[in-house]
Image (cartoon, rainbow, N blue to C red):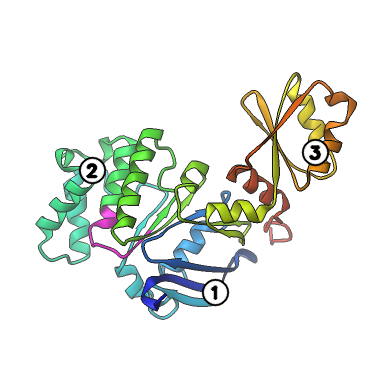
Amino acid sequence: MSGSDIIIDVHGLTKSFDGRVVVDHVDMRVERGRIYGFLGPNGSGKTTTIRMLCGLLTPDEGQGTCLGYDIRTEARKIKREVGYMTQKFGLYEDLSIEENLDFFARVYGIAQRRERIKDTLDRLGLYSRRSQLAGSLSGGWKQRLALAACLIHDPQLLLLDEPTAGVDPAARRDFWDQIHELAAGGMTVLVSTHYMDEAERCHQLAYIAYGKLLARGSVAEVLAGAGLLTWSVSGPDLVAAAKLLRVAPGIRTVAPFGATLHVSADEAQAMSAAMAQPALAGLQTARIETSLEDVFISMMQDAKDNFEGAQA
């Protein structure tokens, strides 16, 4: 693979604030045209990592390139070729959709601005709403406008920081269809998300917790690497059953799923021993496929909170 096919290649990225390490020696390598899912709980360091990649923050340690530019010395060049969509809607609510895009087109000094704006409006299905004020849009349409603003300067890389938070399922699905179309056209996308169904639509995944990168690879590779076995448990009084299972040796996770529990363990023997407790005699178990959510809950339980020992 040639160097031009690697869009992000960073090693040892580290950043601290007020004595607390929020990103701890993170490595990342992302290929052109791939959708790279970045997962982790709130406060895990996802946003800080994204900001270091696009030149908004300088790492305390580590080095690497984004779009072929050095993240330390060529941050200005990176910013020109990246579309960054933040968690919070950041456009002008008292301007129309078209006026917002015109503003960003002017900021980027885009030639033939009118043609580019019209193409972007058409591309995102916004043309018929172009005169509508941004502040009057629903969450899904605001999200679509924010994506349009990210695309107005034809970036090579999209950095999307929890872009579908607070958006209804239909709008989320439409958004992901658009992301896959962009990736099929050669654009590279790094997207942070809390939604496991979205994670499963990514080509590659990275999971970060408390500043540390705990797993990366395709969905299949992450699931295989976890080595978890999972069962569905059904029957009466599952609340009491969950309390017993959570303290049983060798049980990694216990989580309610509808009228059942999902119970994960490293070995089948641990599950057999746990279910042999007399209080659980009336329950039924069945082996099921381990999900990404099962894996990530397990990882979180083993991760060390980076607030511990930090300055008050």
Please, what is the three-letter code of the amino acid marked with disc 1? His
In the image, 170: left or right of 210? left
Q: Nearer the viewer, residue 11 or 24?
A: 11
Q: Which residue is at a point 22% across and 65% down the rendered structure image? A: 108
Q: Residues within 10 Å of mark 3 (few under 14, many from 20)?
A: many
Return the residue at label 3.
271
Instruction: State which tag comes first along the sequence, 2 or 3.
Output: 2
Q: Position of residue 103 (x, y in %)?
A: 20, 56
Per the model, the C-alpha gap separating discs 2 and 3 is 58 Å
Q: Amino acid at mark 2?
A: Asp
Magenta range is: 149-158
- Residue at 30% x, 68% y is 81
Alpha-carbon span between mark 1 and mark 2 = 42 Å
Q: Secondary structure at mark 3?
A: helix
Q: Position of residue 203 (x, y in %)?
A: 45, 55
Tell me whether circle 1 and circle 3 mark residues in contact (CB < 8 Å): no
The kind of secondary structure element at disc 1 is: strand
x, y (%) of residue 208? 59, 57
In magenta stretch: residue 195: no
Q: Looking at the image, which is closer to me, 146 or 35?
A: 35
- The quadrant in which the N terminus is found is bottom left
Circle 2 packing at 10 Å, graded few (<14), some (14-19), many (20+), is: few
| Numbered mark located on residue 11 in the image | 1
Which label lies toward us, 2 or 3?
3
Q: Quadrant of the C terminus?
A: bottom right
Residue located at (38% from left, 39% from top):
172
The answer, for residue 168, to whether it is visible in the render is no
